[in-house]
């Protein structure tokens, strides 16, 4: 079986981000059928439709070209003010334009939300899903992945410290691989 290529978008830009650590853990747990690659979003200029009229910023074009080549998308996000971070929303906007040329359309997706708090960034997870519906990203519904109290799940080295977390994330990835196979446009 050919591996599905999955673009991973980390919503937190913080150097010591729990979200980035979970994204790396997911990449390490991914079975042979998934190849996860983090696509950086921190340097994308803010979306402005005026800049798309003649020659869009090179960073936008490079981002769009890169995302277009993936089979699926995975979002790993914290919660900022009951929503997703601005950098992640900007990446969605940049990839969705110009109108009719969205890089997101039809790509199977999944959301993992990560928080040091108990709720596991529930608000961000569901707010992101609202945008993904509009962007035509068929999004994995079950299992839901809310990673709460993440600080207790990671060791000093940033690796997963609890076997049950690795087991849950591995099962999540297996379901995601099945989801991609069922929903991917050829």
Image (cartoon, rainbow, N blue to C red):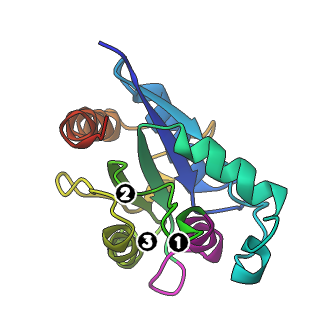
Left/right of residue 154 with respect to residue 58 in the rendered view: left
Q: Is residue 83 magenta?
A: yes
- Residue bearing mark 1: 99
Q: Quadrant of residue 71?
A: top left
Q: Earlier in the sequence, mark 3 or mark 1?
A: 1
Q: Residues within 10 Å of mark 1 (few under 14, many from 20)?
A: few
The magenta-colored residue range is 80-94
Q: Residue at x 40, y 74 (%)?
A: 131
- Residue 60 x/y as whole percent: 73, 59
- Quadrant where the C terminus sits is top left
Q: Residues within 10 Å of mark 2 (few under 14, many from 20)?
A: many
Q: Is residue 74 above or below residue 157?
A: below
* Camera sees residue 160: no
- Residue bearing mark 2: 111
Q: Earlier in the sequence, mark 1 or mark 2?
A: 1
- Quadrant where the N terminus sits is top left
Left/right of residue 173 with respect to residue 103 in the rendered view: left
Towards the viewer: 62 or 6: 62
Q: Is residue 45 above or below residue 35?
A: below
Q: Residue at x 52, y 72 (%)?
A: 99
Measure the alpha-carbon separation of dots 1 and 2: 24 Å
Q: Residues within 10 Å of mark 3 (few under 14, many from 20)?
A: few
- Residue bearing mark 3: 117
In front: mark 3 or mark 2? 2
- Residue 52 x/y as whole percent: 73, 72
Do callouts 3 and 2 mark residues in contact (Cβ within 8 Å)? no
Do callouts 1 and 2 mark residues in contact (Cβ within 8 Å)? no
């Amino acid at each position: 079986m050919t591996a599905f290529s999955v673009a991973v978008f980390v919503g937190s830009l913080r150097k010591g981000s729990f979200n980035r650590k979970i994204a790396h853990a997911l990449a390490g747990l991914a079975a042979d059928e998934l190849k996860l690659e983090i696509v950086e979003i921190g340097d994308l200029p803010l979306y402005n439709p005026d800049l798309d009229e003649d020659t869009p910023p090179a960073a936008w074009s490079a981002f769009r070209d890169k995302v277009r080549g993936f089979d699926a998308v995975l979002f790993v996000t914290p919660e900022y003010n009951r929503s997703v971070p601005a950098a992640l929303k900007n990446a969605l906007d940049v990839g969705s334009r110009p109108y009719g040329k969205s890089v997101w359309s039809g790509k199977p997706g999944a959301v993992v939300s990560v928080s040091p708090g108990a709720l596991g960034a529930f608000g961000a997870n569901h707010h992101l899903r609202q945008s993904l519906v509009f962007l035509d990203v068929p999004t994995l519904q079950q299992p839901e992945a809310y990673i709460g109290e993440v600080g207790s799940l990671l060791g000093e080295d940033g690796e997963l410290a609890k076997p049950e977390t690795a087991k849950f994330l591995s099962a999540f990835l297996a379901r995601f691989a099945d989801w991609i196979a069922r929903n991917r446009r050829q």
